[in-house]
Image (cartoon, grey):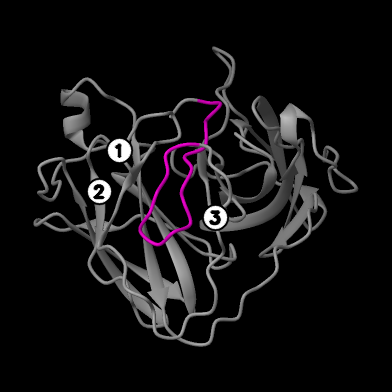
């Protein structure tokens, strides 16, 4: 995917997807007995602007039980048959992101593909409505002269007592697994913005980050309300320059509209992947929103 990336906007209605920067839909309330909805989610535009091209996501069980479960789904081609061949993007055939409507429970996994075209992966789910986002590149896209990945979405309903959590306030610092991550920069509506994440541990900069998905960091942004999706990888270094393994990881991205966004940074260190989450406000009209106090660069 190219950088800066653009958001693939996902509608809130169950099973409904809108491939445009549309307004925020209605929030989904508590889940008791989930209402039925379509088995396959409609395709949406990929972050680089590629439409679903007639592909769809077919989730085989849209009402899984709470707890650790195994999600099974298929990517259906324009002919309605399961897709069997894929081209890798950042070392994987398919990236799957799941998140609850209140932007909790974020998981980024890489499912296994069976010979019949069924993908499977374990997930940990709590009661409520969940969004499933599959970012992938069927081989047939290249044969048709389209090289960009596509983004397909679906929805899950997990029965039980739904306990929605408020969106955390904007903050420039996130602590995760003993690491401190500082965010410098912010998103602006309609124009490219630079984001830098600086990783430290025990007060010392981490300078030996390990590659993860072919880079030293991986970033997903989701817009509060409609869960618009942005999948970004680090900005390319200058020609002949090898990116340093920390402590700073830089990105460039464009937000299509104002609102609150939840950013999820994955980085690998100590042979484990860690995820730091941030809430970032975006002002209308390309203006920078008020950034959280201490929004500065870490040494």
The quadrant in which the C terminus is found is: top right
Residue underneath mark 1: 52
Q: Secondary structure at mark 3?
A: loop
Residue underneath mark 2: 56
Expressed as whole percent of the image width and height from the top left, the position of residue 119 reads 23, 59
Q: Is residue 57 magenta?
A: no
What residue is at 45 percent from the left and 66 percent from the top? 130
- Which mark is in front, 1 or 3? 3
Expressed as whole percent of the image width and height from the top left, the position of residue 2 reads 47, 25
**How far apart, in angstroms, are the residues tagged by discs 1 and 3?**
21 Å
Q: Give the total number of marks visible in the rendering.
A: 3
Identify the mark nearer the N-term, 1 or 3: 3
What residue is at 45 percent from the left and 34 percent from the top? 47
Q: Secondary structure at mark 1?
A: loop
Expressed as whole percent of the image width and height from the top left, the position of residue 32 reads 45, 85
The quadrant in which the N terminus is found is: top left
Write down the region rendered in magenta.
3-20
What residue is at 68 percent from the left and 28 percent from the top? 193
116 horizontally vs 25: left or right? left
Tag 1 and tag 2, C-beta contact below 8 Å: yes
**How far apart, in angstroms, are the residues tagged by discs 1 and 2?**
7 Å
Residue closest to the far right: 293
What residue is at 62 percent from the left and 43 percent from the top? 208
Disc on res. 30: none
78 horizontally vs 53: left or right? left
Along the line of sight, the residue nearer the viewer: 82 or 233: 82
40 to 20, vertically: above or below: below
């Amino acid at each position: 995917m190219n950088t800066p990336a653009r958001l693939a906007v996902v509608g809130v209605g169950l099973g409904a997807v809108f491939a445009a920067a549309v307004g925020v839909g209605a929030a989904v309330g508590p889940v008791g007995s989930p209402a039925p909805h379509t088995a396959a989610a409609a395709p949406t535009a990929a972050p680089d602007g590629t439409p679903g091209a007639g592909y769809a996501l077919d989730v085989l069980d849209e009402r899984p039980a709470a707890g650790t479960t195994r999600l099974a789904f298929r990517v259906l081609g324009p002919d309605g048959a399961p897709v069997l061949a894929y081209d890798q993007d950042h070392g994987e055939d398919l990236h799957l992101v799941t998140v609850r409507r209140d932007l909790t429970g974020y998981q980024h996994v890489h499912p296994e593909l069976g010979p019949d075209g069924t993908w499977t992966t374990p997930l940990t789910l709590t009661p409520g409505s969940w969004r499933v986002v599959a970012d992938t590149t069927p081989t047939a896209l290249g044969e048709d002269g389209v090289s960009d990945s596509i983004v397909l979405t679906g929805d899950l309903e997990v029965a039980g007592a739904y306990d929605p959590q408020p969106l955390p306030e904007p903050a420039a610092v996130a602590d995760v697994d003993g690491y401190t991550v500082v965010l410098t920069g912010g998103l602006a509506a309609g124009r490219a913005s630079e984001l830098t994440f600086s990783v430290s541990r025990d007060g010392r900069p981490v300078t030996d980050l390990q590659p993860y998905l072919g880079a030293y960091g991986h970033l997903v942004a989701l817009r509060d309300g409609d869960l618009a999706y942005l999948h970004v990888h680090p900005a390319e270094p200058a020609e002949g320059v090898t990116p340093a393994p920390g402590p700073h990881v830089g990105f460039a991205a464009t937000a299509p509209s104002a609102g609150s966004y939840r950013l999820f940074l994955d980085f690998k260190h100590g042979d484990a992947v860690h995820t730091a989450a941030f809430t970032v406000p975006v002002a209308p009209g390309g203006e920078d929103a008020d950034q959280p106090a201490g929004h500065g660069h870490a040494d």
